[in-house]
């Protein structure tokens, strides 16, 4: 039976509808990085993963979990799932492009090696629909009403990243 070793909830501000999860030593914009995801939730290279978001105007919520072994499959209201293997040198960074890193070098209990990764999403479509409806309810995006309603949508789009050291 597997057990969770770490749980971290992080607000993410996507850059160009995406954010990156990678080894702290990796060069996110370097030639070894993955291509941008096209019609997919993720795109990966050996030590990096790009996550495609539905939002770029709102912050999204990311929960990172490290497990001592593969956790049981999870569905609890999550809509999409993607899987991959990443090589990490004992740490994890989450990069938001020009906004900087949400997490700079989170130390992982599993140490250096291949990590199984599962990414789940929730409320992607609902967040896009709700944001579009703001313009119908409040035509002036500079109005206080629009800005308050916009803040209420922050974190609506959610991601769960589960990772464990492959044996």
Image: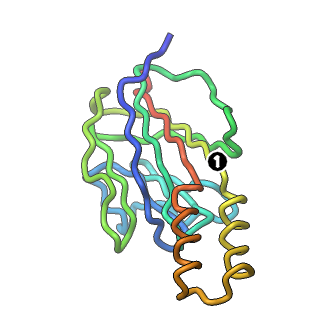
Q: Residue furthest top?
A: 1
Q: Position of residue 148 (x, y in %)?
A: 53, 72
Q: Is residue 84 above or below residue 116?
A: below
Q: Is residue 148 above or below residue 4?
A: below
Q: How many marks?
A: 1
- Write the residue at 40% across / 31% down: 66
Please name whichever residue, 93 or 141, is drawn nearer the observer in this view of the structure. Answer: 141
Q: Position of residue 73 (x, y in %)?
A: 63, 26
Helix, strand or loop status at disc 1 = strand
Q: Position of residue 108 (x, y in %)?
A: 29, 33
Q: Is residue 160 above or below residue 50?
A: above
**Residue indicated by mark 1:** 122
Please name whichever residue, 113 or 93, is drawn nearer the observer in this view of the structure. Answer: 93
Quarter containing the C terminus: top left
Scheme by which the image is coloured: rainbow
Q: Quadrant of residue 165?
A: top left
What is the crowding at mark 1: few (fewer than 14 residues within 10 Å), some, or many (at least 20)? Answer: many
- Write the residue at 37% across / 54% down: 94
- 113 horizontally vs 41: left or right: left
Q: Quadrant of residue 52?
A: bottom right
Q: Position of residue 16 (x, y in %)?
A: 51, 74
- Write the residue at 47% across / 53% down: 49
Q: Is residue 129 above or below residue 135?
A: above
């Amino acid at each position: 039976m597997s057990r969770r070793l770490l749980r971290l909830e992080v607000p993410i501000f996507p850059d160009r509808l995406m954010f990156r999860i990678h080894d702290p030593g990796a060069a996110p914009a370097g030639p070894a990085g993955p291509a941008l995801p096209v019609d997919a939730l993720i795109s990966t290279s050996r030590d990096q993963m790009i996550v495609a978001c539905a939002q770029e105007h709102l912050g999204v919520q990311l929960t990172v979990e490290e497990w001592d072994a593969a956790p049981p499959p999870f569905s609890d209201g999550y809509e999409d799932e993607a899987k991959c293997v990443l090589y990490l040198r004992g740490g994890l960074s989450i990069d938001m492009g020009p906004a900087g890193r949400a997490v700079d070098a989170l130390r992982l209990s599993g140490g250096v090696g291949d990590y199984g990764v599962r990414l789940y999403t929730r409320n992607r479509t609902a967040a896009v629909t709700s944001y579009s409806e703001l313009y119908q309810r409040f035509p002036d995006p500079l109005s206080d009403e629009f800005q308050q309603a916009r803040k209420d949508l922050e974190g609506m789009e959610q991601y769960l990243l589960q990772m464990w050291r492959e044996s």
